[in-house]
């Protein structure tokens, strides 16, 4: 079975900690970020062309003017510090569900700098080690990378070869023309994503509204996905709080006629309805008309025990099925 690739934007982190993180800190989209980071005083006396309070717009403008180098450095430092401080609450979050909904043939590629997805990955690996690849498309405050040995890991871990603690990865800041090839770690993540998308049967875009400063990113994604006429069987899903017509229009270059699923809530997505078998189940439904039972998946309010018990039979199937065979269709009726 081919892969399921999930692309995450800021909306996904907001869905993961709707009431703030462990310490009540909220993540945020770029609007209002300047105030939140206490940067208002810094840019107060600067005459900006942009009227927007969006960090991406402000950063982009300052970045182009060499006299604001020090302010740019200060913004970067505060952003890095703020995102590093975020911590997951104890109970399972959407990020835990998301990670457990996929397996090692799949990938989650995130545009987010925050460490929450990585924190979820670490605790979910105690339930199963059969987890998706994580790709950080704009760098991540929780990830380190050893340039010399091309190894990566969490920032507090050590490189298995030189035994030195991983240096932090650079964050790719919101300038209009981003260079995805300049930083080796980010470049490698994009290459891996290109491969994954190419080999995907399903593509889910979660909380990522393709802001105008990400033009280059969207065109890279489109290149990887290829022509629509070659993607007639594939299934694209969108999870977003943005109105359906608006968000579908943004992603129209990825969607073949009406072949897509839109949901506001993660729990109504294929990922949550058919965890760990989304591709298998959707393929069986569309190609063989096999009805699927959507009552066996994740639901809101599950605790760690519920999750552990729900995953157990799926995990068992994964362990006993030879690698070259198709996994049993867990969610289709066996009548
Ligand atoms: Zn090393």
Image (cartoon, helix red, strand yellow):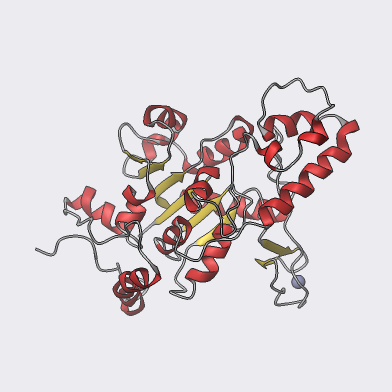
Residue 264, horizontal then vertical, whole percent: 37, 41
Closer to us: 46 or 328? 46
Which residue is pictured at 29% across the width and 74% down the height? 313
User: Residue placed farthest to the left in the image?
Assistant: 335
* Residue 244 percent coordinates (x, y): 37, 31
Vertical side of 291 occupied by 46: above or below: above
Q: Where is residue 222 in the image (x, y as percent from the top left)?
A: 51, 38
Residue 63 seen anywhere in this rendered image of the structure: no
- Label tally: 0
The image quarter in which residue 49 lies: top right
Q: Say whether residue 83 is left or right of residue 43.
A: left
Q: In this view, does 83 lie above or below 210?
A: below
Image quarter of the N terminus:
bottom left
Residue 16 coordinates in the image, percent (x, y)? 49, 53
* Residue 302 visible somewhere in the drawing: yes
**Image quadrant of ligand 1?**
bottom right
Q: Is residue 261 above or below residue 129?
A: above
Looking at the image, is 229 positioned above or below residue 308? above
Q: Quadrant of residue 10?
A: top right
Which of 76/41 is in front? 41
On screen, residue 325 versus residue 102, left or right, reads: left
Q: Does residue 268 appear to the left or right of 125 in the view shown? A: left
Query: Quick one: which residue is furthest to the front in this view?
Result: 24
Quadrant of the snapshot with the C terminus? bottom left
- Residue at image position (62%, 34%) is 31
């Amino acid at each position: 079975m081919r892969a399921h690739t999930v692309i995450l934007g800021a909306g996904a982190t907001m869905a993961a900690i709707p009431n703030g993180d462990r310490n009540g800190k909220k993540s945020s989209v770029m609007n209002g970020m300047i105030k939140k980071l206490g940067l208002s005083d810094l840019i107060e006396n600067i005459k900006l062309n942009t009227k927007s309070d969006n960090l991406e717009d402000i950063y982009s403008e300052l970045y182009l003017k060499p006299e604001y180098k020090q302010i740019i450095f200060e913004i970067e430092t505060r952003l890095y510090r703020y995102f590093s401080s975020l911590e997951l609450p104890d109970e399972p979050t959407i990020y835990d569900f998301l990670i457990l909904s996929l397996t090692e043939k799949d990938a989650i590629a995130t545009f987010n700098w925050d460490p929450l997805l990585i924190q979820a990955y670490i605790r979910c690996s105690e339930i199963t080690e059969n987890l998706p690849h994580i790709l950080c498309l704009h760098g991540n405050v929780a990830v380190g990378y050893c340039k010399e040995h091309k190894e990566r890991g969490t920032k507090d871990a050590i490189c298995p070869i030189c035994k030195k603690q991983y240096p932090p990865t650079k964050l790719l800041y919101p300038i209009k023309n981003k260079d995805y090839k300049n930083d080796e770690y980010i470049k490698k993540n994009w290459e891996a994503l290109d491969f994954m998308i190419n080999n995907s049967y399903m593509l889910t875009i979660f909380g990522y509204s393709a802001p105008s400063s990400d033009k280059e990113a969207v065109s890279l994604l489109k290149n990887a996905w290829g022509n629509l006429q070659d993607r007639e069987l594939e299934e694209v899903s969108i999870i977003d709080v943005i109105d359906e017509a608006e968000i579908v229009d943004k992603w129209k270059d990825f969607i073949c006629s009406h072949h897509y699923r839109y949901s506001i809530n993660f729990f109504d997505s294929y990922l949550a309805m058919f965890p760990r078998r989304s591709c298998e189940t959707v393929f069986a439904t569309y190609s063989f008309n096999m009805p699927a039972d959507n009552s066996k998946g994740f639901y809101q309010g599950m605790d760690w025990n519920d999750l552990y018990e729900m995953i157990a039979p799926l995990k068992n199937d994964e362990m006993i099925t030879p690698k070259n065979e198709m996994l049993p269709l867990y969610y289709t009726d066996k009548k």
